[in-house]
Image (tube, rainbow, N blue to C red):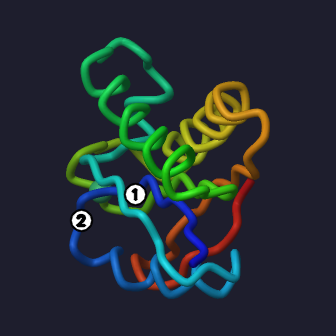
Amino acid sequence: MSFCTAINCMDGRVQLPVIGFLQTRFKAEFVDCITEPGPVRIFAKTTDLIALNSIITRTDISVNHHGSSQIAICAHPDCAGNPVDDDAQKEQLKRSVIFLKEAYPNVNVVGIWIENNLHPQEYC
Ligand SMILES: [Zn+2]
């Protein structure tokens, strides 16, 4: 069994597109889904330590117990949990990738922008 990890928004529009994209991109059978409203906001600000630690605890389970070696952090337009413009979200996405690469140096981390809430693409 092969697992990868998605840290994605809770938004229902983006779940299935991201799962399908990551199964192909990471050649993974299963996608562990960690969802929050606008997770890139949590990584970029690092002021909500409860939310941040909760994401890290769940990511640790995926990496340490499921052997995931690939993490995708995702952002999308019109995010109710992170109501800033697309450019600001993409900056947060870059900072999230940097954070996760430092936290998980042995894991491949990519930043995914979900264009039109339908089309995931590797942004950073
Ligand atoms: Zn969202």
Q: Quick one: SS at disc 2? A: loop
29 shown above or below 81: below
Q: Name the residue tied to disc 2.
A: 11
77 shown above or below 97: below
Category of crowding for the residue at label 1, using alpha-carbon neighbours closer than 10 angstroms: few (below 14), some (14–19), many (at least 20): many
Category of crowding for the residue at label 2, using alpha-carbon neighbours closer than 10 angstroms: few (below 14), some (14–19), many (at least 20): some
Residue 27 image position (x, y, % from top left): 69, 82
- In the image: residue 15, left or right of residue 115: left
- Residue pictured at 35% horizontal, 23% vertical: 53
The amino acid type, in three-letter code, at marker 2 is Asp
- In the image: residue 76, left or right of residue 90: left
- Disc 2 CB within 8 Å of nearest ligand 1 atom: yes
106 shown above or below 98: below
Please tell me which residue lies in front, 75 or 72.
72
The amino acid type, in three-letter code, at marker 1 is Asn
- Residue pictured at 32% horizontal, 15% vertical: 49
- Residue pictured at 49% horizontal, 45% vertical: 89
Q: Quick one: SS at disc 1? A: strand
Which numbered disc covers residue 8? 1
Spatial separation of the CA atoms under disc 1 and disc 2? 8 Å
Please tell me which residue lies in front, 98 or 105.
105
124 shown above or below 14: above
Residue 66 image position (x, y, % from top left): 51, 58
